Image (cartoon, rainbow, N blue to C red):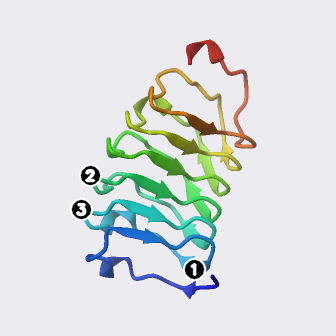
Amino acid sequence: NNLNGTIQWDNINLIHQLLIPDNTFTGTVDLTGLPQTFLKLNVHGNQFSGELDLTQLPPELMELKVGKNSFSGTWDFSNLPSTLQTLTFDDNQFSGELDLTSLPSNLIEFRLSDNQFSGTLSLVGLPNTLTELFATNAGFTGTIDLTQL
């Protein structure tokens, strides 16, 4: 598709999924206003920018795909819904150090490649359900202890 423009995030109260990958939408994404019954958000491959607030995500959210945009800022995973299975934020401009010890227990896929993180990447305490972890070219330094998996 070649859909474009901005999205009024406060007007999506009646839907449970918004899947608009690989278009040319612009503007910011307000995750705090998503309906409490929201299940999936996929805005991968657009031109969105700004910071994302993960502190008030819908409690039943299963999929959050925000990769390949121009998002920036740091991440705090301590308030993610326990139902989250897919979290992809690869190919953006996120930065800072990551603490992966509070990822949701049902997480299966986690993509953080091609960002500007710093520090080391500790794999201690990852969810047992996690089967896909992508962290190439993400800015991490040091060694990774694979014996903890």
The three-letter amino acid code for the residue at tag 3 is Gln
Residue that mark 2 sits on: 59
Q: CA distance from mark 3 to mark 1?
A: 24 Å
Decide if residue 117 is on the left or right side of residue 77: right
- Which of the labelled discs sits on residue 36, or is there none? 3
Say which label, 3 or 1, has the lower sequence index. 1
Q: Residue at x 38, y 37 (%)?
A: 106
* Structural crowding at the residue carrying mark 3, measured as other residues with C-alpha within 10 Å and reported as few (<14), some (14–19) or many (≥20): some
Disc 1 is placed on an element classified as strand
Vertically, is 92 above or below 128? below
Decide if residue 46 is on the left or right side of residue 56: right
- Which of the labelled discs sits on residue 25, or is there none? 1
Disc 3 is placed on an element classified as loop
Decide if residue 39 is on the left or right side of residue 124: left
User: Which of 62 and 50 lies nearest the eye of the viewer?
Assistant: 62
User: Which of 56 and 85 lies nearest the eye of the viewer?
Assistant: 85
Quadrant assignment, res 48: bottom right
The three-letter amino acid code for the residue at tag 1 is Phe
Vertically, is 51 above or below 107? below
Residue 40, given in percent of the width and then of the height, sits at 40, 61
The three-letter amino acid code for the residue at tag 2 is Pro
* Structural crowding at the residue carrying mark 1, measured as other residues with C-alpha within 10 Å and reported as few (<14), some (14–19) or many (≥20): many
Residue 6, given in percent of the width and then of the height, sits at 50, 84
Say which label, 3 or 2, has the lower sequence index. 3
Q: CA distance from mark 2 to mark 1?
A: 26 Å
